[in-house]
Amino acid sequence: MIQLVRKHLMVTLIALIFAPVAMAQMQPAKRIAPKVIKGVSLNASVDEVWTFVSQPKSFFEAISEVENLKCPAISEGAKMSFTLPNDSKREQEVSAVNKQEQVIAYYITQSDYYHQNFVYRILVGADGDKAFVQFEGIFATDSKAEDKKLKALVEGEWMWMKKALEEKFN
């Protein structure tokens, strides 16, 4: 009988020790749909456009609104900073480059736009015999007013990118 009581106490003790660990496990991250999706067809091959947009230094230098660009590396993990007319403290990094899928993602870590991090994705594909660039702005705020403000700023930034792409390829 004493052994049975000890066994139950031991099982209970083990359960109590491991209970906080089981409760502290993180839930999987929730996917956030892009709030901004824009695109442009360009008079160039997919390979030409991909080569250009997958080189952050060259791509951002072509955007006339970008000033004070610092981009020492041009690969995944490249950290960069620059200023824009509405954003004096932009810092971002290349968070993913997928040459096969022709996608590059930027993780914006600091911006005057919004106090939280957000993501831009640029995808290159074919549109008939032309190249097509799709831009996505991915962010989530707790406020519809904040969403609307950030969406307008992100769309404005896309327009600068689009202008640079059209000047280069059209």
Image (cartoon, helix red, strand yellow):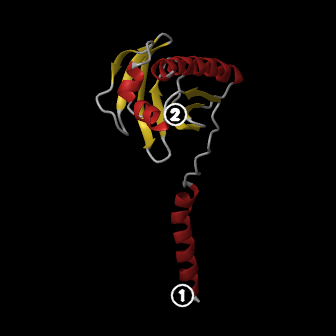
Give coordinates of residue 45: x percent, y percent: 48, 34
Asked whether, in this view, residue 155 is left or right of residue 161, the answer is right
- Tell me the residue at 57%/22% (across/down): 154
In this picture, is 69 found above or below 7? above
Of the residues under marks 2 and 1, which one precedes in the sequence? Answer: 1
| Image quarter in which the N terminus is found | bottom right
Give coordinates of residue 124: x percent, y percent: 52, 36
In this picture, is 15 found above or below 168? below
Query: Which residue is nearer to you in this view: 53 or 75?
Result: 53
Q: Which residue does the numbered mark 1 point to in the structure image?
A: 3
- Quarter holding residue 138: top right
Query: Which residue is nearer to you in this view: 64 or 77?
Result: 64
The single residue placed furthest to the left in the displayed view is 72
Query: Which residue is nearer to you in this view: 86 or 99?
Result: 99
Q: Amino acid at mark 2?
A: Ile
- Kind of element beneath mark 2: strand
Label 1 neighbourhood size at 10 Å, few (<14), some (14-19), many (20+)? few
Single out the mark in the foreground, 2 or 1.
2
Label 2 – label 1 distance at C-alpha: 66 Å
- Quarter holding residue 65: top left
In this picture, is 169 found above or below 138? above
Q: Amino acid at mark 1?
A: Gln
- Quarter holding residue 91: top left
- Kind of element beneath mark 1: helix
Q: Which residue does the numbered mark 2 point to in the structure image?
A: 122
The single residue placed furthest to the bottom in the displayed view is 1
- Tell me the residue at 45%/29% (across/down): 109
